[in-house]
Image (cartoon, rainbow, N blue to C red):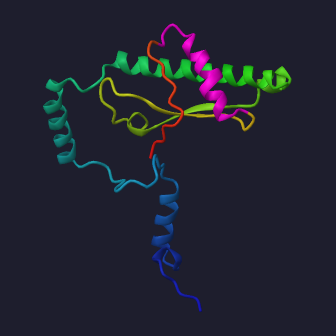
Amino acid sequence: MNVKMWSSQGNNSNANAASKEEKNLRTLGMTSAISVAEPKPSDLTRTNELKEALKPYNVFESEEELNHRMEILSKLNTLVKQWIRDTSIARNMPPNVAEQVGGKIYTFGSYRLGVHHKGADIDALCVVPRHIYRSDYFTSFFELLKMQEEVTDLRVCISVIVK
């Protein structure tokens, strides 16, 4: 028995075109956008009114502050790559291979979505090759961070689980 439950499974060319267009959309989270339509003039007006209402509360970051965040993330990514290389070599991996094993910092949350406020944290995920262990992160990477003069308040929270 062949039952078509969704219109995109049918032969409707409009539905197929819409399906192809949906596949090309960029998703920044678990779900797609509610709407991909361009804003109406009234939407832009209301957005500007909201921005003006929030300005007295000093919630928006300056261009300089945004650039500082990007600089910090770049430094953190460099430290992660250095740590991965050093840890890999310590595990008897040849240096030329250790340079190529990868690893990266990924941001998520309000910063990634561009909806963070002034002074907010940056949620970041450290992705490493499988020969680097979680315990390495809380020991050797912690020590590497501790040596950085920019780092002023550093704590290890091994048992914390974010839900």
Q: As rendered, which of 8 and 160 lies closer to the eye? A: 160
Image location of residue 121, percent across then percent down: 39, 28
State which quadrant residue 129 falls in. top right
Residue that appears at 51% across and 83% down: 4
Where does the N terminus fall, quadrant-wise? Answer: bottom right
Q: As rendered, which of 133 and 46 lies closer to the eye? A: 133
Image location of residue 28, percent across then percent down: 46, 46
Residue that appears at 75% across and 31% down: 101
Chain part drawn in magenta:
132-151
In the shown orientation, is residue 55 left or right of residue 121? Answer: left
In the shown orientation, is residue 10 left or right of residue 35? Answer: right
Q: Is residue 69 above or below residue 132?
A: above
Main structural element of the magenta stretch: helix, strand or loop?
Answer: helix
Residue that appears at 14% across and 24% down: 56
Q: Residue furthest top?
A: 149
Q: Is residue 43 above or below residue 17?
A: above
Q: Is residue 32 above or below residue 55?
A: below
Q: As rendered, which of 137 and 116 lies closer to the eye? A: 137
Q: Residue furthest front?
A: 159
Image location of residue 139, percent across then percent down: 63, 23
Q: Is residue 137 magenta?
A: yes
